[in-house]
Image: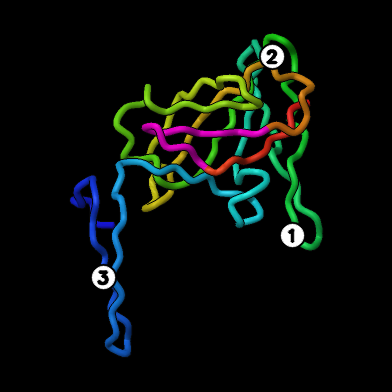
Amino acid sequence: MPAATAVGEATITVLTGTGSTSTGRVAIKNATPGIFTANGNGAGVPAALAVRIGADGTQTPVNVFACDAAGRCAPAPISLGAATDQTFVSLYGTGVRKRTDLDKVTCTVGGVAAPVSFAGAQGSIGLDQINIQIPNSLRGRGDIPVLLTVDGETSNPVTLNVQ
């Protein structure tokens, strides 16, 4: 979509190589978030990175997913560590960079509000990054849904496993 495209209703016309056309109406929005998944189908575990930060500032990478020999990926248990540790997950997706304000980006993990510290362009065209903190109150919950909302539009649900 061209950067200067106005928000609102638009008409799209597609011209095929054979000369036939097809026309339809679409709603153009600032943000319509979609979270990329490890399985590549928009469901299951997010294609994400995580880090746990200890009270002393030590940073430990944490696996978010594991894939089997056939390439099927499932949530890996995320250890939240000690009660004083903080665990952050970087989700990757699209439809976030044109958000109106960071305050209009919210995330719930297992129905609990997860603080969002960043939501915007990751540096590549079409690749956005959303950094969230997993609340320690979710310790031991197992597989739980993650929902991202940007400017009132909700993403596809993904799943994390919290030990």
Residue designated by label 2? 137
Identity of the amino acid at label 3?
Thr
Q: Is residue 152 magenta?
A: yes
Q: Estimate how packed mark 1 is, as few (under 14), some (14 to 19) or many (20 or more) residues with alpha carbons within 10 Å.
A: few
Residue designated by label 1? 71
Secondary structure of residue under mark 1: loop
* Labels in figure, total: 3
For residue 137, side relative to residue 31 (left or right): right
Q: In what quadrant of the picture does the C terminus appear? A: top right
Identity of the amino acid at label 2?
Ser
Secondary structure of residue under mark 3: strand
Assess whether mark 2 and mark 1 are in contact (beta carbons under 8 angstroms): no
Marks 1 and 3 sit apart, C-alpha to C-alpha, by 38 Å
Residue designated by label 3? 13
Q: Nearer the viewer, mark 1 or mark 3?
A: 3
Assess whether mark 2 and mark 3 are in contact (beta carbons under 8 angstroms): no
Secondary structure of residue under mark 2: helix
Q: Is residue 157 visible?
A: yes
Q: Nearer the viewer, mark 1 or mark 2?
A: 2
Please tell me whether residue 14 is drawn above or below residue 81 in the rendered image: below
